[in-house]
Image: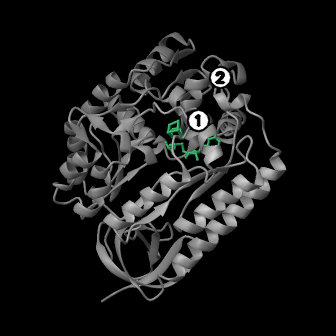
Amino acid sequence: MNEYDSNRITDLLSFANYSKVSEPDDAQCFIFNTCNIREKANQKVYSDVGKIRKKFRDRKVKPIIVLAGCVAQAESNLVFEKSDYVDIVVGPQSYHTLPDLLNNFQSQKKKSINNEFNVIEKFDKLNQIKRNSNKVSNYITIQEGCDKFCKFCVVPYTRGPEYSRSVYEIVEEARRLESLGTKEIILLGQNVSAYKHENNNLSGLIKEISKLNRIERIRFTTSHPNDFNDDIINIFKDEPKLMPQLHLPVQSGSDKILKLMNRNYTKKKYINLIDKLLKAKPDIQFSSDFIVGFPEETNEDFKETLDLVKNVNFTNSYSFIYSERPGTPAVNFEKIPLSVAKDRLKSLQDLLNNIQSKASSRSIDKDNLVLFENKTKDKKQFYGKNIYAQPVFVKNQGINDGDLKFVKITDYNKNTLFGTIKD
Ligand code: SAH
Ligand code: SF4
C-alpha cells in the first residue's frame, strides 16, 4: 500500500508543480513514506534520514524533509525528538494536505504535523487528481484500516478504522488506468475481504471491474480468513479474470497462539476454508504470512504451524519473527527468547522454500500464460507474471509490454521461473 500511496503523493505533487528528480543530489525535498509494522522498518527510516543529513551537510540550504506514513502516525512529535532534521510529519490519512504543508513550510519555516484521520477528505482530493501510471500492472486501494485488533498489530492505530471507497470511484480509477494501458489491477487493502460499500462487497466490485474489456487480470490482497463468505469463495469460480492465487495470512497453526493473537479462528476452520476454496477453484494456489516466536509459543505450538504448512502446500509466503510494537496489547505478554524464535524462523523458512522449489520444479516443460510487464534493466530479458503471480523471465525478442503469451518453462530458481515463448 505504501507503493500505491507514494505514487499518489507523486501525482498530487506533480499537480502542485513539483517534479520528481532522478538523482538524490538534485532534490530540494525528500519524502520518506514509512512503514511501522515491525521495529526494523521503523529504525531504517531514521538511519535513511541520517544519510541525507550527511550528504547535504556542506550545502548552504538544507533540503525539506518530510516523514510520511505509519511511523509519522505512530510517533507524531517524537519524530522531531528522534531526528531534528525532519521538518514535516504527515500520517497516511492526511497526505493529501502535503502541497499546503510544503507551501506553509516554505513561507514560514515552521515545523508541522498533520496526523488527522481524514480518509474521506483524502480520497475526495485524490479522486480529482488523475493517475498517470502507464504500467501494465497497477494497484488500486479499495479499502483502508482495520477493526480487527490482532494483539500484535499496529495497523488499527496507524491506518485507523475500516473504510471502503465507493465502487464508482474505484471503477473510474480502473477505467483511467485501462486507458493508459493497464492490463492487470491488484485491489489493495489491509482487509480487502472486509470491503463493503452500500450494498456492494468484494465480489460485486470484482464483477464491475471485470466488465472493463482491456483489463485481463484481477487480483486482491490482503484478506482475513474470517471475512471469507461463500460469495467471495464463489467469485473465484465465477469470474475468469480473477486469478487463481490467494494470499491468506494465517500467522500460526496453533489454536492457543491464534487465540492469544485475537485472530478468532482455529487451525481447523482455516483448513476448512482452504478446502472450500479448492473445491470452488481446483487450480488455486495459496500464499500466507507467518509470525514465529509470538509470546508463549512452545515447541508444540510451533510444530502445529509446520504441520499446517505441510498440509496446505503454501507457495511464495512471508514469515517474520514477532516484533514488539509500542501501544499494542501483546507488549504485556511474556516473551520467548530471541534465539529460539530465530531457530524456528529458519526451520519454517527452510520448509517453505522446499515446498516452493518443488512447486517450481513441477512447472518445468509446462506452458504458463504470462502477462509481460517490462524489460529488465539491461534490456536483455522480459519480465512478466504467470497466473499465480510468479515472476517469469524470457530472453526472446519482439515482446511488448502488455503482451499475453504462453511460455514454456525451462528453468527455475527459488521463486522465479525462466522459459521461452511458445511459437
Ligand atoms: N491484514 C492482514 C495483515 C496485514 S500486516 C492480516 O490480517 O493477516 C502484514 C503482515 O505483517 C501480517 O500478516 C503479519 O504476519 C506481519 N506482522 C504484523 N505485525 C507484526 C508484528 N508485530 N511482528 C511481526 N510481524 C507482524
Ligand atoms: Fe493487523 Fe491484519 Fe490483524 Fe488488522 S487483521 S489487526 S491489519 S494483522
Q: Which residue is mark 2?
A: 79
325 in relation to 365, above or below: above
> Residue placed at 22% from the left, 32% from the top?
198
Q: Position of residue 240 (x, y in %)?
A: 24, 65
Q: Nearer the viewer, residue 231 or 145?
A: 231
Q: Position of residue 29 (x, y in %)?
A: 53, 31
Q: Amino acid at mark 2?
A: Val
Q: As drawn, which residue projects farthest toward the front?
A: 268
- The answer to which of marks 2 and 1 sits earlier in the sequence is 2
Q: Which residue is mark 1?
A: 153
> Residue placed at 33% from the left, 63% from the top?
243
**Is the CB of mark 1 within 8 Å of ligand 2?**
yes
| Circle 1 SS class | loop
> Residue placed at 47% from the left, 82% from the top?
363
Position of 54 compared to 255: left or right?
right
Position of 334 compared to 74: left or right?
right
| Circle 2 SS class | helix
Quadrant in which residue 423 is drawn: bottom left
Position of 179 compared to 52: left or right?
left
- Please count the marks in the image: 2
Q: Nearer the viewer, mark 2 or mark 1?
A: 1
Q: Residues within 10 Å of mark 2 (few under 14, many from 20)?
A: many
Q: Nearer the viewer, residue 371 or 38?
A: 38
Residue 292 visible somewhere in the drawing: yes
Position of 79 compared to 230: left or right?
right
215 in relation to 416, above or below: above
Q: Position of residue 225 (x, y in %)?
A: 45, 48
Q: Amino acid at mark 1?
A: Cys
Residue 184 visible somewhere in the drawing: no
Q: Nearer the viewer, residue 145 or 55?
A: 145
Tell me the distance, in whole angstroms, between the alpha carbons under discs 2 and 1: 20 Å
